[in-house]
Amino acid sequence: MPAGRPAADVLDELRTLRGADAPTRGGRTFAYVYDAGLDGLDELAAAAYSAYATVNGLDMTVFPSVARLENDLIRSAAALLGAPGTQGTFTSGGTESILLAVKTARDHARAERGVTDPVMVLPSTAHAAFHKAAAYLGVEAVVVPVDPGTFRADADAIAAAITDRTVLVVASAPSYAHGVIDPVAQIAGAAADRGVLCHVDACIGGWLLPYLRRAGREVPPFEMSVRGVTSLSVDLHKYGYADKGASVVLYRDEQLRRHQYFAHAGWPGYPVVNPTVQGTKSAGLLAQAWAVLRHVGEDGYTELARQVAGASDRLLAGLAGIEGVRVLGRPSCGLVAFTLEGAEGPHGEGDLSLLLHLADEMRLRGWYLQPQLRFDGMPPNLHLTLTPATVHQVDALLADLHEALTAARALTPVTVDPGLIELAAAFDPASAPGGETPQLGPDEIAAVLAFAGLGDAEGTGGATALPDRMAPVLVLLDALPASLKERLLAEFVGSIFRI
Ligand SMILES: *Cc1c(COP(=O)(O)O)cnc(C)c1O
């Protein structure tokens, strides 16, 4: 006797809303989505999810099949990436895997080494999730610059940064920003020599690199079998092609993993043991990942890796033929980041402005390339994540890239009012004299957002209308100090989620 709207109506509305989003299938959205291009895979994932949607993964004694599915899945991950003794956990994503690995390292160091003021050593290209973990867990992040030519972590500099307070050292295989693999063996070896744990962030590469190797590509060792690697994260919702909400964190042994678990008996409710961050959790995500892994299979993943490598080769060759385009570093698999070289704009930020205009022009033509801003001497760039579904789109992409670049060059460069930057600097904690920083109030924030073309369209205090072109927003962001960037990003997103 539901008194609300008919199911068909509700579903219709959802489908209509989805029409405003970037497509997640078809190979034109080069970030956020992973499309194996396999017939029937989405339907399988949905059916497996649905079969387990109402099962609560919180209690495996009531729902024992949850333990069976998770053990199967971890066994597959350990067979691909583990070493003798490896144990692991299924999580909701790379961020959760990383949060858990950092918590484990922090608690391990406290218990085994008496470290009470923990530090982790990160290459500057480490994923933002490590900084999130640092902020959530009270671990200080020490950031070590990468090699400015290759964008790979500097193993010697990382080794030199290790102290008695270091609880974890991190290497990426590969990094998200540039898709290059850090020297894992040197970094992990240096950590082991000092008795410090080492996490390999293989969130994006872990389910691709081993299969690229099987497909005949050269891939340096980065797995748990490398001396000194004590934990590793791999996202199944990336190159495992599972639906979103599926990742694995592996540990060298059960004793280490024990520091990840949270147990609590000091309340009147049921006895709590949470291996992960969540309490109640749908077993649907685990079931769909389990089903996708089994259905694609070893040979399937090898073939999909071969397709990604082929797309990457063709894209790199095509980009090399476009005047002014420079690929950053030597990307090892599905990720490619390129920048534009050449004319400086009137305020010196011409390359950035042109690059962002290019991204906007590509978006108008139905492609999403992900802008990445300048950081620590590393050039701004556009980032592409290749999946098997993009294989057949490479030629069309390159053709539109030529056209979009011509269109972008004809546009007026976006510049930021120097007065605004001066004003902003006054609110920057890093540059304020005597540490006395005025706080940005709601009016100043609204003024800065409005300057970037953001702000609530009707002036009624409602939600921010998203702009068609992102270049003005991103050029402004790029010009601001990091702390202010972060503040504005938070205000901006808060203004979108406003009811
Ligand atoms: C995607 C990614 C993460 C974070 O994973 P989420 O699934 O987005 O939470 C961490 N590290 C790397 C290298 C990644 O590519």
Image: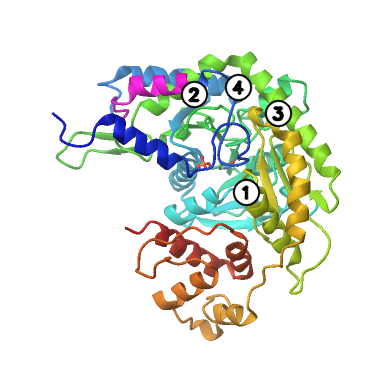
The span from disc 4 to disc 3 (Cα, nearest Å) is: 29 Å
Q: Is residue 310 above or below residue 470?
A: above
- Whether disc 1's CB lies below 8 Å from ligand 1 is answered no
**Residue 45 highlighted magenta (yes or no):** yes
- Quadrant into which the N terminus falls: top left
Closer mark to the observer between disc 4 and disc 3: 3
The residue that label 3 is drawn on is 392
Closer mark to the observer between disc 1 and disc 2: 1
User: Is residue 464 in view from this perspective?
Assistant: yes
Q: Amino acid at mark 1?
A: Arg
Counting residues from the N terminus, which is met first, the one under dot 4 or under dot 2? 2
SS at mark 2 in the image:
helix
The residue that label 2 is drawn on is 42
The span from disc 1 to disc 2 (Cα, nearest Å) is: 25 Å
Q: Which mark is residue 363?
A: 1
Q: Is residue 423 above or below residue 158?
A: below
Magenta segment main secondary structure:
helix
The residue that label 4 is drawn on is 80
Residue 191 position within the rendered picture, expressed as x and y whole percent measured from the top left? 64, 43
Magenta extent: 42-57
Q: Amino acid at mark 3?
A: His
Q: Amino acid at mark 2?
A: Asp
SS at mark 1 in the image:
helix
Which class describes the residues within 10 Å of circle 2: few (<14), some (14-19), or many (20+)?
some
**Which corner quadrant of the image does residue 230 belong to?**
top right
SS at mark 3 in the image:
helix
Residue at 40% of width from left, 60% of height from top? 494
- Observer-nearest of 382 and 457: 457
**Which corner quadrant of the image does residue 252 belong to?**
top right
